[in-house]
Image (cartoon, rainbow, N blue to C red):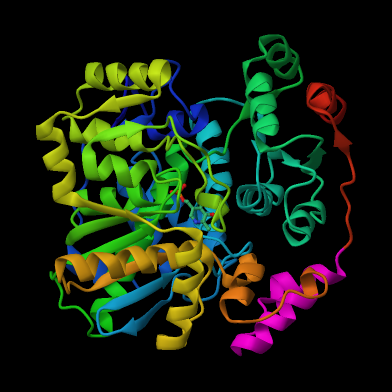
Amino acid sequence: MKLVSTRDKSKQVSPAEAIVKGLSEDGGLFAPTSFPIFALSDIMHTPSYSELASYIASAFLPDFSRKELSTLTHEAYNNFPENAAPIVGINKFTHILELYHGPTLAFKDFALQLLPHLLTAALKKTGVDKIAVILTATSGDTGSAALEGFGSTDGVKICVFYPESGISNVQKLQMTSQSSKNAKVIGLKGNFDDAQSGVKQIFADTELAALMNEKNHIFSSANSINWGRIVPQIAYYFWAYSSLVRSGKVALGDKVNIAVPTGNFGNILAAYYAKKSGLPVHKLICASNSNNVLSDFIATGVYDKNRDFHITVSPSMDILISSNLERFLFELHGHDDGKIRDLMQQLKSSGRYELDAEALALMQESFYAGYVSDGDTINSISDTWKKYSYLSDTHTAVAIKVHEDYVQKTKDSTPTIIASTASPFKFADSVILALGGQLEGDDFERLEHLAQLSGVSVPESLSALAQKEELHKTVCSPDEMRGQILDWLL
Ligand SMILES: *Cc1c(COP(=O)(O)O)cnc(C)c1O
């Protein structure tokens, strides 16, 4: 298996090169030329999460040996509980796949705990003898997960910019208490967009790149289009399936649905890739909040980002351009790179493109989509709690509701895996309100309040934060970002 740019198939790279590069020079994403097919009986025989992850990953990263990957996944998933991705049935055919038991309590840990190891190995394989410097702009979840993963890895450094006002105290402390010498955390006087465009400018700064190169450093990105972030996510869908078979909820070979709360389309793309690789999937259910550009697209074939942007109670899905969708479009159009260039050009110039009838029908064979307002998200948390005594965060609640609507509409009772992407304690305020509680006291008092309301204890990594010190106090304006990086590195 090789990888090619979705915008130019003649550009072939190895998986290690794709991980180092992140994005192709033509703006395309790296996508596989073909898919491995896993035998389900083999999936059933892998004893631990990290072993299964290395087995799946080795097929998508053929230039890494199985033994090498086994060491890397073991190191990465050591930071999780023994069952890294437990699955909890809430009714006869609905099963919640809890992807939030990693160090920062969101599913991004699955990829961001492994990616630093993949990147350092990939640098060696491609003969780049330099220190990779990860630059990230974050609105919350990504920054802390990236810091946890990269901060503790030798041979890489990481710098995170976050909007100084606009994230919760808990989210801020998760980042600013980072003690690793490899990490720099900077508050930006501006919003997330300012942080993101500042980082983009630094990536495009050739003079700075040359300076860095002299000092043996190279900029790299950990964002969700990196091939090294997609691969680790494919594994947990196989893990979930094998868990359901082991517990007798599904017979080996029977189909399941997978519902995913979706923003940048990375997590649900991994589920689609799992399907292409032999996982028996009936429907992929794409769940959005009121930034419903994807659910409109899947219903009509028209992708149109020209609409109001909403700040919602499920902020990690507040997105109008879902970058990873490009990889799906590449599959949908039979690897027609010219077609992808054309669609992406339309998206750039008019913010809109439309599928032809054939592609639309093909997409709808695999995908169903729906969206949920903030009010209904809170109701979904509340209903799920009342009906099943199951506590869900706002993102997961969106997927639970869209799945419920799907079942009502279609009467489909195929067993369904719902990806739960964050701990309810990460979005405690909304969950407290959904359970009928009051918002009082500081962030840490609220966590305790939610624990009292629900009988679920506060995750240790969050309660431990109360004792932690703010170590990173640098704040800068957007035009000082470049100088900050230079001061830190050179
Ligand atoms: C990032 C994130 C999502 C969206 O995932 P995509 O892969 O971007 O679709 C959903 N929920 C949570 C909690 C997240 O952090």
> Magenta span: helix, strand or loop, mainly?
helix
Residue 57 pos. (x, y %): 37, 51
Residue furthest out toward the top: 207
Q: Is residue 81 left or right of residue 292?
A: right
What's the residue at 38%, 23% (across, down)? 28
Residue placed at 20% from the left, 48% from the top?
A: 276
Q: Quadrant of residue 162?
A: top right
Tally of marks: 0
Q: Can residue 55 be seen in this view?
A: yes
Q: Is residue 409 shown left or right of residue 429?
A: left
Residue plotted at (41% across, 46% down): 266
**Which range of residues does the magenta coloring cover?**
445-468
Q: Can residue 132 be seen in this view?
A: no
Q: Could you tell me residue 48's position as x and y percent?
A: 40, 72
Residue drawn where x is 51% and y is 69% of the image: 378
Q: Residue 352: x percent and y percent?
A: 35, 25
Q: In this view, does 133 lie to the left or right of 261?
A: right
Q: Which of 388 and 172 is in front in this view?
A: 388
Q: In this view, does 121 lie above or below 254?
A: above
Q: Where is residue 324 in the image (x, y as percent from the top left)?
A: 39, 38
Measured along the vertical axis of the image, is residue 64 above or below residue 411?
above
User: Is residue 192 rendered magenta in the image?
Assistant: no
Residue 75: name its quadrant: bottom right
Between 90 and 50, the residue placed more toward the observer is 90
Asked if the stretch drawn in magenta spans residue 455, the answer is yes
Name of the residue lying farthest toward the left: 358
- Placement of the C terminus among the 4 image quadrants: top right
Name the image quarter holding the N terminus. top left
